[in-house]
């Protein structure tokens, strides 16, 4: 049984907007799934998808338990994600599940809950050139990526990005219009690893790009649990000290 | 007008428990206020207190606006703090207000919201010795503190502490019973600085201790806003690029 | 007596190159000194300069002892700085002296010694536009700085920059030619604070720019010692334990 | 061909001191090698050892090229390690070679060069109890380790430890005599990963301990290169910009 990978997608733009449908006829999740399937070793991953409009958003306790790494794409309906489900995804991250947060999911409930900050940014959607520079050569997530990834036409995201200081800065983007953005950022929360990756607006075929697909493969491999230590997530009263206490 | 300091205290144990009342007859907040008043320069601070059972927990918009640094002590009634107030305190931290989180407030709604993690720990209340070692000599919060602070009788907190990696580790505690704990930790969230400081259980006269009072003074001075940059906390659409964009 | 500030400059280009001499007739250090003198409060700083060709590079033990914050500019003669002097500056940083490392000093002996990495980067000197974006609003070093600083004509520095992960990322630059760079980075080493600030090539009048002068003032104020804890920098044998040890 | 692992040992105490010889008759390196050999998967590692008194300290260019992860133990003869060899090891770390720094090697030339700080600490050798607490459950290096590792008799290392802030704090030690110490610390420098692990004094059979052996196995697996990006370590002049520059 391969590593359990769940690709979660809001899956609304693709149904409502013909331009998006033309790029992602079966949904953004399906193109990401296909990319991971094509590039991974045989049997390495057990890939599945879940979407907002499924019962429990497709994230039942059984699905969550089987998920080692989750990818999350959302944009227009962040508020429709039920708080109880966000709570359960959050718990799984603290238990060790990796989470890859994609593009506009910087504003998802789960990412904001994990970061504790506003997670805001500046944006512009006019189709401009982006260069995603590798700032951390040798990092697992940059494996096989050249000096920079160039996207000919994309939405711009600009600084300041309202996040805690990244623990590892893997990519920084340059935009034709004059802005910069921290496009690839790593954090650890509890036993789980989190990677935010900027590219991926629904109106551009970003997830068809070979270099972007490679980064997603790398990110999933990086984010997988490293081995779980069975620690409680509540406050344990350890009544019996290991050492004698004189005044007790 | 001095720096606006608000000491927030749950103020329940002191009313309900005689042993606590004996140590903090007017409340923990009053002893902390007195300590800051005694040690600060004249006119340096404008000190006030707020407690859970006041309307809006004493944290009206006017109070929040005048607060540059807030100290937070809570223990038995974290859940009674209204979410709307927590939301407003959170916003103020992102705007630049410093927050000093004390002892059992590791489990407060505001700290957990800012950290994004479980914030759990291990504990034991048998009255054992603690040594709080300075791990970051030269840090503003360790100013005037010797190699370690010794507390003869205190509650134990033990690792693992469910927090994001501290950005600055100022103190680590040794406990007689055999545990260690990251007792002094710094983070930045948005434009605000956060300091967690472990000592301070209600049944021990910790906040009467001169070294602990010195650390609180240092922490307040460290946490004050460094100067506000007027950035929105929403996502701004910057339609007009600074540079010409060829294909638009 | 104000805070002791020493501006160290290699001071070679200004003597050998007429174009540089035209911009910095009395040396880069003199323009930086003037800027700090103009913007600081009266009596806040005690400013002095030191240059490579002075005896001991102008960094005698007496000068080093009186220096609370040092600014360092070098480019063509890094190798001529004596290792013994570098050793003494390094010791002062570990004792708490702040160090502001300017532009091409990314390759100075002292910066490389403090970072432990290659400190290499990519560069191009064709006079292109740079935008230095504030990525950490509210940071002391960004005080009074707008969303970004624009320099019309400058040398380019590009990623990857061979540094340890910055502890605080204050600025990131955009370049007209297509690159990005982490232009404002903070670290702490020992009891000292270090700030690297990218702008400042000798053939451009960067240090005459009001926003750049403001950043240098902010950086000096940020980098000043926060209060010294008298810790040895050797390994101390603490023979007498604080607690009884059973088997000894 | 397995991952190239080189265990470097000063190998002096074992020759000169009978007590040490009794614990490590063939040298500390041999016991570490045996531990890695016993616990690793068949064919996973290609293990070899090198010692100070070999020509070039056993670290020829060929050996260095074949080394993916190096373990380093030294104590009494740090100064005898030639600077040119240290330079070559340093270069290999920046290229991606992992480095596991053991116990008294906190004072080795290579660790101090990578950290840029004094790397000093406090110590006491009376044979006291140590508890090494896991502060980062779920970390690859803590895999299979219980809440804490207990060593009955060991040398004490105490804070403050003169290091840059660890990027990941995996272990913190408690000592019977009253001190604490950051015993397991991670950093990245260039493309290489560095792990410092405290236990291991020559007069105690620490490297025979099953939990310590497990940590060393975990650390080697964690520190292995994640995939190399071919970046220069010098400053490259990229004359031709990717974008047109107006004024050039």
Image: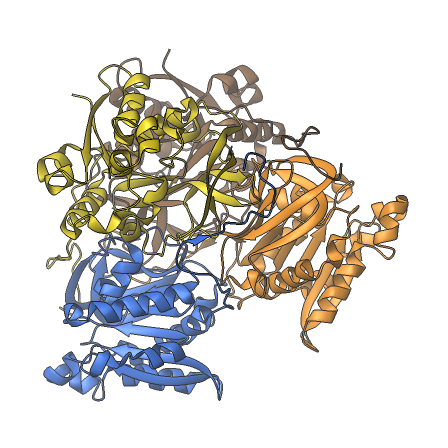
Chain colours: A yellow, B blue, C orange, D brown
Q: How many marks?
A: 0
On-image quarter of the C terminus of chain B: top right
Residue situated in front as seen by the camera: C75 or D196: C75
Percent from the top left, x then y, of residue A162? 41, 54
Residue situated in front as seen by the camera: C225 or C204: C204
Q: Residue at x 80, y 60 (%)?
A: C30
Q: Does residue D205 appear anywhere in the picture?
A: no
Find residue C243 and report its image quarter. bottom left
Percent from the top left, x then y, of residue D183? 35, 45
Would residue D95 appear left or right of C86 to someone viewing this image? left
Would residue D136 appear left or right of B142 to someone viewing this image? left
Q: Residue at x 20, y 56 (%)?
A: B120
Percent from the top left, x then y, of residue B36? 39, 82
Residue situated in front as seen by the camera: B232 or D212: B232
A55 is higher (above) or lower (below) than B79? above
Q: Does residue B162 appear anywhere in the picture?
A: yes
Percent from the top left, x then y, of residue D38? 26, 20
Residue situated in front as seen by the camera: B219 or B139: B219
Q: Name the residue at the front extreme.
A: A18
Find residue A29 and report its image quarter. top left
């Amino acid at each position: 049984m391969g590593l359990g990978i769940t690709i979660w997608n809001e899956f609304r733009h693709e149904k409502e907007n013909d331009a998006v449908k033309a790029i992602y006829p079966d949904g953004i999740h399906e193109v990401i799934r296909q990319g991971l399937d094509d590039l991974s070793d045989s049997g390495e991953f057990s890939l599945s998808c879940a979407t907002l409009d499924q019962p429990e958003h497709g994230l039942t306790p059984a699905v969550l338990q089987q998920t080692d790494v989750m990818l999350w794409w959302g944009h227009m309906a962040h508020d429709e994600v039920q708080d109880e489900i966000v709570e359960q995804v959050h718990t799984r991250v603290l238990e060790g599940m990796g989470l890859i947060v994609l593009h506009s999911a910087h504003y998802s409930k789960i990412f904001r809950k994990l970061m504790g900050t506003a997670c805001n940014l500046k944006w512009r959607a006019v189709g401009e050139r982006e260069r995603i520079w590798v700032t951390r050569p040798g990092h697992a997530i940059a494996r096989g990526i050249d000096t920079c990834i160039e996207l000919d036409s994309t939405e711009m995201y600009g600084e300041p990005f309202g996040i805690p200081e990244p623990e590892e800065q893997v990519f920084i983007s340059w935009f034709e219009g004059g802005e910069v953005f921290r496009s690839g950022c790593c954090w650890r929360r509890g036993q789980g690893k989190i990677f935010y990756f900027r590219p991926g607006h629904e109106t551009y075929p970003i997830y068809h790009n070979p270099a972007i697909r490679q980064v997603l493969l790398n990110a999933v491999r990086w984010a997988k649990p490293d081995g779980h230590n069975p620690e409680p997530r509540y406050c344990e009263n350890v009544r019996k000290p290991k050492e004698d206490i004189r005044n007790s």
